[in-house]
């Protein structure tokens, strides 16, 4: 049953269906809720509506308080959007933003296409065909005059004196002599010969080290060294020493080592060949 209700806020009349059983009526003009008085002596007829979510008939708009359908997404009175609580008038701004992004993309693509269009096409340059050459007319060959010996005298051959072959050999021998002198000087500086009464340190091939005073260094067939140590006198054979210790005592061994390093022939063909300690 529809009755007319006067809004208490905007004083406008609107129709209200009281058969729903609710005593609250939303004014369609201002959206305010009005209390509807029940007529005296009448009993309202209750009708069950399966599609009615609430007794109030819907949900109010958070902005304008207008009653809307329970599944409403936006308010048709003020434009409020329930999803995310944004105003409906904010949608054009989003659309404008997307439009600006699209325009910027089109501008970039257009600029690239324009620059490529302006560049000259790189085509392979085809060389021009050479002009056709016509063969010259053959002319009869004129025999050249044969010059005589009197016209062009042959210059005399000047023989340049060739250097004597002995100069290269002498130069090579001088280089060898300088190299030998430098090697012997360096050996005397780094490993000078031990003298009698020197405090020496002899290392054997077994790794043993003997410290003492050199009493006598044998020569010739007496190829031993005598040291005065804390335990007494020690007689050490040259063959038992390592290379560095023997180079500082054995003159013959020292000469063999020098010639071996310089790749020189032995000074005396009868000289003993160097032993394995020279390696």
Image (spheres, rainbow, N blue to C red):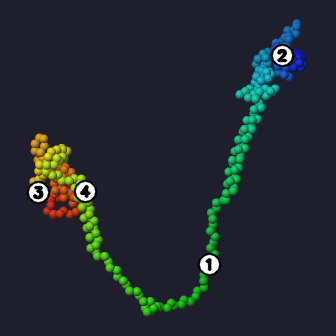
Which of pointers 1 and 2 lies earlier in the amino acid sequence?
A: 2
Left or right: 13 in relation to 193: right
- Quarter of the figure with residue 179: bottom left
- Mark closer to the chain start, 2 or 4: 2
Q: CA gap, disc 1 to disc 2?
A: 113 Å
Label 1 secondary element = loop
Label 4 residue SS: helix
Question: Viewer-nearest of labels 3 and 4?
Answer: 4
Residue 279 spot, x, y in % from top left: 22, 54
Please name the residue that numbered disc 2 is placed on.
Answer: 34
**In the foreground, 87 or 68:** 87
Label 3 and label 1: CA atoms lie apart by: 97 Å
Tell me what residue is drawn at x 40 percent, y 86 percent. Answer: 155
User: Tags 1 and 2 in contact by the CB under 8 Å rule?
Assistant: no
Q: Name which quarter of the figure residue 54 lies in.
A: top right
**Mark 1 and mark 4: Cα distance apart in space:** 79 Å
> Which residue is identified by label 3?
220
Q: Which mark is residue 186?
A: 4
Q: Which comes before the other along the chain, label 3 or label 1?
A: 1
Q: Which residue is nearer to you in this view: 96 or 141? A: 96
Circle 1 residue: 133
């Amino acid at each position: 049953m529809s009755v007319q209700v006067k809004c208490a806020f905007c004083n406008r009349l609107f129709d209200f269906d009281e058969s729903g059983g609710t005593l609250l009526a939303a004014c369609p003009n201002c959206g305010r809720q009005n209390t509807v008085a029940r007529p005296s002596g009448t009993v309202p007829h209750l009708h069950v509506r399966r599609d009615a979510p609430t007794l109030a008939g819907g949900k109010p708009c958070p902005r304008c308080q207008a009653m809307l359908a329970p599944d409403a997404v936006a308010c048709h009175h003020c434009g409020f959007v329930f999803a995310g609580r944004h105003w409906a008038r904010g949608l054009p701004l989003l659309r404008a933003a997307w439009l600006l992004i699209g325009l910027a993309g089109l501008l970039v693509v257009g600029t690239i296409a324009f620059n490529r269009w302006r560049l000259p096409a790189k085509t392979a340059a085809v060389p021009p065909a050479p002009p056709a050459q016509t063969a010259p007319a053959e002319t009869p060959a004129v025999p050249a005059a044969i010059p005589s010996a009197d016209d062009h005298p042959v210059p005399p051959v000047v023989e340049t004196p060739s250097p004597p072959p002995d100069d290269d050999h002498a130069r090579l021998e001088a280089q060898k002599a300088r190299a030998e002198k430098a090697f012997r000087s360096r050996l005397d500086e780094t490993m000078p010969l031990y003298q009698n009464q020197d405090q020496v340190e002899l290392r054997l091939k077994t790794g043993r080290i003997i410290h003492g005073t050199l009493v006598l260094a044998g020569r010739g067939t007496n190829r031993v060294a005598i040291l005065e140590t804390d335990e007494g006198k020690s007689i050490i054979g040259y063959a038992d020493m390592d290379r560095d210790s023997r180079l500082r005592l054995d003159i013959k061994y020292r000469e063999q080592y020098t010639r071996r390093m310089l790749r020189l022939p032995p000074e005396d063909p009868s000289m003993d060949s160097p032993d394995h300690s020279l390696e």
